[in-house]
């Protein structure tokens, strides 16, 4: 149906899949996040960007956190071709980052949980619970 990197993967090589997940995570969490999303995804940040109003735009953090989680979700979709797994990644990434913003997690704890999700995805592919779509 759509473009997917999954066509060149063999799920019997779990480390290749895990490496792709880790690369996607690194891209989405660092260069593709940018300063705006990194700052304003946190509801506890008091400053507002120019042109935004504290009252009118009080849910800016929801939009920023969701946009950031969607980038991660897109990476999982590109790697696996599985829309529903991308939705799972969207929810998990959103919740983990929200916990980090509320100081329930350290930076290391946040990254550990994100990469732990990718390890779980990889294991589910490796043991055959999940399967990469076959190219048409």
Image (tube, rainbow, N blue to C red):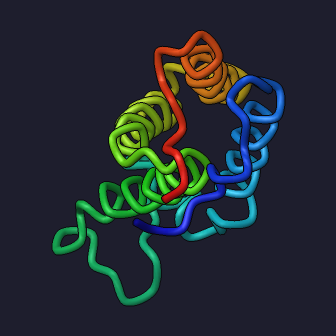
Q: Give the camera-side residue of 25 and 108.
A: 25
Q: Give the camera-side residue of 13 and 74.
A: 13
Q: Is residue 7 above or below residue 115?
A: below
The total of numbered circles placed on residues is 0
**Farthest front residue?**
136
Q: Is residue 86 above or below residue 61?
A: above
Residue 31 location (% of width, % of height):
74, 65
Q: Give the camera-side residue of 10 and 100.
A: 10
Residue at figure coordinates x 53%, y 64% from the top left:
37
Residue 28 location (% of width, % of height):
65, 56
Residue 26 location (% of width, % of height):
76, 48
Q: Is residue 114 above or below residue 46?
A: above
Judged left or right of residue 3, residue 56 is left
Residue at figure coordinates x 52%, y 59% from the top left:
71
Judged left or right of residue 84, residue 74 is right
The quadrant the N terminus occupies is bottom left
Residue at figure coordinates x 58%, y 58% from the top left:
38
Residue 21 location (% of width, % of height):
69, 40
Name the image quarter holding residue 105. top right
Judged left or right of residue 42, residue 11 is right
Residue at figure coordinates x 47%, y 15% from the top left:
129
**Farthest left residue?**
56
**Farthest top residue?**
127
């Amino acid at each position: 149906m759509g473009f997917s990197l999954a066509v060149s993967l063999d799920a019997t090589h779990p480390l290749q899949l895990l490496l792709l997940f880790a690369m996607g995570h690194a891209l989405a969490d660092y260069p593709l996040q940018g300063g705006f999303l990194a700052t304003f995804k946190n509801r506890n940040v008091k400053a507002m960007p120019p042109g935004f109003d504290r009252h009118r735009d009080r849910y800016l953090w929801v939009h920023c956190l969701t946009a950031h989680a969607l980038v991660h979700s897109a990476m999982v979709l590109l790697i696996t071709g599985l829309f529903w797994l991308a939705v799972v990644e969207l929810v998990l990434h959103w919740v983990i980052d929200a916990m980090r913003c509320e100081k329930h997690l350290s930076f290391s704890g946040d990254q550990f949980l994100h990469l732990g999700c990718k390890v779980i995805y990889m294991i589910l592919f490796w043991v055959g619970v999940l399967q990469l779509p076959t190219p048409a």
